[in-house]
Image (cartoon, helix red, strand yellow):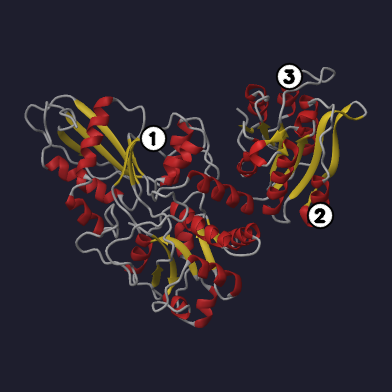
């Protein structure tokens, strides 16, 4: 949530009515021009800091009488938090964004959405909303993502004489006990996500154990995270007294607009904006025409985009401490000290070669953050049937089993000692007629991390074993449910490369009936199934998670299960559908 400091066609060339409703809706203006008949209503949801200038530009468009063909256009502009609209749009397309959850009752699904960052659009698409393909997407504004520091803290680190990098900040986080860092929850805040991408990229680029360095950086940030932006801003020191500076927040990834807006309130200790190299993804304010709107609305949206691309709009943005889409400020824009001259162009920390968001980097950052910050209790169940001996060409001909074990080992290193983890393997008739074997019971990693690591490394496929899927899922679900713990994500994560092949076990119908009977919404157990290779049946697996909640991830390339495992473990519980 933003802080209180922030404040074509003939059909579309029509008389405009810009409506203002109480609350978050802006203004009321009606033009009764002769010959105006019919009406097209266009709803626009914009991030709170840019909504006032979008509304003002729409009002001017109405005043100038863009009329043709006798059609009236009503434009409603509302200030909406990007995370709330993202949740609503994702829900409409049948997906849930990790770390975001379900939409609140106040969010709208507009015709046109102007979030603060294109990463919202990409995250919705990445989450499985294949039909989500918004039109236009052109940027209408920009605000660089910076590291905000109280001026005395920045001066102590050598500002403004010394140019700092993200690698320098990582070193300071690891060595300077006086530097308190913070971040707005990056799964719900685009500036926080951009900062997280830049910081973890810097941590992973150094020498030594890169994964360990990334994990350390994530955990350091996690201790200073805030759910809301205004809460984080309130943690900056309100006095230049050394004790206040030591106790207050010393560094946080925010937008340039945040820093300017904060300093306009004339706080006792102003903030400095540090433009670290490499530049992180900026807030780029895409103009997204959401799919499925009628052609007349799409045409109206196209003309409105033209009004928001006019030179005068850049000057309006300057009044809101925002730059034009090319990174250059309009008339009256007062950049913070140390800002690069001639505009700010992203160098792509977490971006692609073209400067846009990198989908895999976004997924990895969101997954890693969710794992590092959530409290979890997990039973990991790994298929050891004979087919797991198959080689994986993309992994140097390591077997499916070896690739799966490597993914589980990597995931275990990401979670801290507060997690509780257990390990089973399954095939058919592993222990007598039982299809599964407990290797390590669910328990705190603080006590059994080395035991789990040893057990994982010793896993081997059963040469003639089949896949006893249904009996294993039911037994594992009951085990997680029996000692369910509040305040944790209680989950079952199962890897398999085949279908149920146990003729002596329960049927699919019996499994689903029993899971439906014992599932308890007050004690949810999230079931995550990772299907490996081309022999799995997604339909078979999804029938299970529709009853329990959770998700199914299937990959034809077993070499990709490492990144899939991290995404799967990062899932927050969903209610059974």
Circle nearer the N terminus (2, 1): 1
Label 2 belongs to which residue?
450
Res. 295 image quadrant: top left
Q: Residue at x 43, y 46 (%)?
A: 119
Query: From this viewpoint, which residue is outermost toward the right?
Result: 432
SS at circle 2: helix
Label 3 belongs to which residue?
508
| Up/down of 248 relative to 460, above or below | below
- Name the one closer to the observer, 500 or 19: 500
Label 1 belongs to which residue?
109
Task: Give how far apart the Cα atoms at labels 2 and 3 are.
Answer: 36 Å
Q: Residue at x 54, y 41 (%)?
A: 101
Relative horizontal placement of residue 440, taking residue 44 as reference (left or right):
right
Query: From this viewpoint, which residue is outermost toward the left?
Result: 34
SS at circle 1: loop
| Up/down of 224 relative to 72, above or below | below
- Name the one closer to the observer, 353 or 570: 353
Disc 3 vs disc 1: which is toward the camera? 3
Q: Where is the C terminus found, in terms of image quarters?
A: top right
Circle nearer the N terminus (2, 3): 2
Q: Residue 37 in the image: x percent, y percent?
A: 14, 25
């Amino acid at each position: 949530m933003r802080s209180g400091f922030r404040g074509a066609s003939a059909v579309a060339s029509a008389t405009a009515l810009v409506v203002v409703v109480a609350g978050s809706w802006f203004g009321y203006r009606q033009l009764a021009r002769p010959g105006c008949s019919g009406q097209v209503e266009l709803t626009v949801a914009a991030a709170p800091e840019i909504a006032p200038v979008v509304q003002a530009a729409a009002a001017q468009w109405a005043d100038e009488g863009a009329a043709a063909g006798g059609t009236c256009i009503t434009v409603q502009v509302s200030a909406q938090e990007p995370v709330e609209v993202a949740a609503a749009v994702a829900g409409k397309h049948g997906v849930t964004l990790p770390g975001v959850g379900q939409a609140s009752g106040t969010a709208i699904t507009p015709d046109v959405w102007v979030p603060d960052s294109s990463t919202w659009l990409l995250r919705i698409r990445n989450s499985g909303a294949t039909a989500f393909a918004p039109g236009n997407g052109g940027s209408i504004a920009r605000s660089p993502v910076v590291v905000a520091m109280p001026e005395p803290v920045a001066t102590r680190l050598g500002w403004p004489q010394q140019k700092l990098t993200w690698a320098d900040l990582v070193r300071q986080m690891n060595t300077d006990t006086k530097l308190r860092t913070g971040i707005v929850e990056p799964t719900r805040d685009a500036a926080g996500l951009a900062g997280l991408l830049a910081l973890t990229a810097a941590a992973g680029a150094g020498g030594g154990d890169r994964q360990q360095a990334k994990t350390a950086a994530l955990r350091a940030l996690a201790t200073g995270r805030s759910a809301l932006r205004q809460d984080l801003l309130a943690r900056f020191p309100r006095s230049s007294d050394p004790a206040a500076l030591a106790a207050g927040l010393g560094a946080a990834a925010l937008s340039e607009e945040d820093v300017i807006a904060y300093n306009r309130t004339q706080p006792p200790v102003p903030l400095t904006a540090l433009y670290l190299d490499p530049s992180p993804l900026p807030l780029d304010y895409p103009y997204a025409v959401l799919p499925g709107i009628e052609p007349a609305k799409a045409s109206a949206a196209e003309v409105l985009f033209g009004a928001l691309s006019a030179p005068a709009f850049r000057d309006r943005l300057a009044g809101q401490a925002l730059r034009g889409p090319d990174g250059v400020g309009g008339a009256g824009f007062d950049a913070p000290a140390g800002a690069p001259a001639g505009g700010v162009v992203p160098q792509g920390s977490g971006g692609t070669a073209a400067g846009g968001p990198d989908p895999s980097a976004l997924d990895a950052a969101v997954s890693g953050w969710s794992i590092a910050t959530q409290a979890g209790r997990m039973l990991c169940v790994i298929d050891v049937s004979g087919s797991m001996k198959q080689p994986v060409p993309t992994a140097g001909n390591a077997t499916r089993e070896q690739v799966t074990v490597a993914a589980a080992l990597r995931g275990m290193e990401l979670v801290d000692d507060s997690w509780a983890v257990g390990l089973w393997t399954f095939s058919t008739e592993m222990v007598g007629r039982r299809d599964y074997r407990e290797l390590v019971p669910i328990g705190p990693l603080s006590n059994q991390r080395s035991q789990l690591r040893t057990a994982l490394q010793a896993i081997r496929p059963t040469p003639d074993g089949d896949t006893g899927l249904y009996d294993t899922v039911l037994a594992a679900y009951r085990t997680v449910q029996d000692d369910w713990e509040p305040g944790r994500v209680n989950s079952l994560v199962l890897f398999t490369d085949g279908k149920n092949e146990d003729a002596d076990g329960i049927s699919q119908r019996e499994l689903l009936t029993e899971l439906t009977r014992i599932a308890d919404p007050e004690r949810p157990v999230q079931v995550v199934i990772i299907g490996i290779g081309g022999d799995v049946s997604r339909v078979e697996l999804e029938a299970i998670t529709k009853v329990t909640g959770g998700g199914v991830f299937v990959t034809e390339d077993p070499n990709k299960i490492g990144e899939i495992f991290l995404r799967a473990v990062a899932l927050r519980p969903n209610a059974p559908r």
